[in-house]
Amino acid sequence: MSLLEFDDVSVTYRSGGADVPAVRGVSLTVEAGQSIGIAGESGCGKTTLTGTVLRLLPKSTKVTGRVLLDGEDVLTMSWGKVRAVRWAQAAVVFQGAMHALNPVQRVGDQIAEPITLHSPTTSEKAAQQRVGELLEQVGLPASRAASYPHQLSGGQKQRVMIAMALACSPKLLIADEPTTALDVMVQAQVLDLLAGLVRDLGLGMVFISHDLSVLASSCDRVAVMYAGEIVEERPAAALFDHPRHPYTAALAGAFPKVGDPRFRYSPAGLPGDPPFPGELPSGCPFHPRCSIAIDRCSSEVPPLQRADDGRVACLRSGEHLELLGGGAS
């Protein structure tokens, strides 16, 4: 049994009196001790999809399909059960630690809060001891528990957010672009920390990012989303080095590799913008921006099919590797 399973999940928002599909029929599994990356441009549905795991979406949102956490459908749980699941079975490292931490509370008190909420019999001394252990686990001295958020650097704040997510020993960690605002050196440290937690604690992790190169170096598998759907899902290194979908190739090509003659000049980039979810083009949603689209692409929706070591949704997935130059290898 998988730790987390999205089974044909669709999410629809209500906007301006109309239904807007943000996620469309996504199926994906995460095993214990495995890290899955979800990549794509802003608005592709990454955060919306993972928001279903702990029921964090607005009440007006319509969610169909099944979201199985340890075999139990989160979407059918009572609110009392959902509250019990949050922090204890699954936790989120939110994007932007600066905005996720309360600026007028010491970070130790913020980490202790979920501990005492989920285990009311825990004494204050035991909670503070656990806080110190968590801070040291993420590479900070226990004394930092007395600090306010403004007294910490960006990387330290992110470590505090990770410590808070681990407070109740969850089985699943959802990291929503945890390195976006960090410099390169601190980003590498946080990525190493997350990889170590998955390895040492046996956590399952869903890592959301628009940076395909980060996911390729820190995840076991990567799912690429476009217009609310998965268009490719394969082992991370293989997907980055040899993409099977032209959108994946465009994302990989946005990160030049030093010494590769194909990146001697500036990358051409990806023209256009992602489609508005409520006004998707006919056929393949990516075809208006695709450099290798054929006539069929404008009228035929490519299914997500098995392809060697994963899945891909492209009518030309079996032939366009050479046309795309093999990605960013």
Image (cartoon, rainbow, N blue to C red):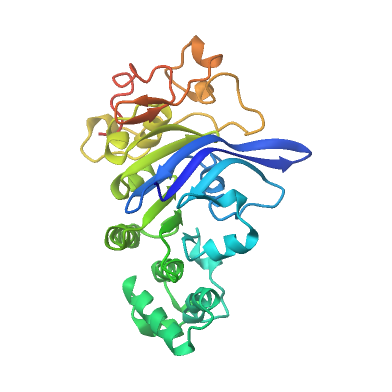
Q: Is residue 208 above or below residue 88?
A: above
Residue, x 39% and y 84% (percent of image)? Answer: 129
Q: Is residue 21 visible?
A: yes
Q: Is residue 124 above or below residue 160?
A: below
Q: Position of residue 172 (x, y in %)?
A: 42, 57
Report the residue that reaches farthest toward the bottom. 125
Tell me residue 70's x, y (percent).
Answer: 45, 53
73 or 42: nearer the eye?
A: 73
Identify the residue at image location x=53%, y=77%: 113
Q: Is residue 139 visible?
A: no
Q: Is residue 304 above or below residue 300?
A: below
Q: Nearer the viewer, residue 29 or 61?
A: 29
Q: Quadrant of the C terminus?
A: top left
**Residue 244: percent from the left, percent from the top?**
35, 26
Looking at the picture, does residue 149 appear above or below residue 94? below
**Image quadrant assignment for residue 304:** top left
x and y percent of residue 276 in the render?
A: 63, 33
Left or right: residue 325 versus residue 56 is left
Report the residue at 62% width, 64% height from top: 80
Residue ID at (46%, 12%):
294
Tag count in the figure?
0
Task: Tell me where residue 128 sits by quadrant.
Answer: bottom left
Q: Residue furthest right?
A: 17
Q: Residue furthest top?
A: 295
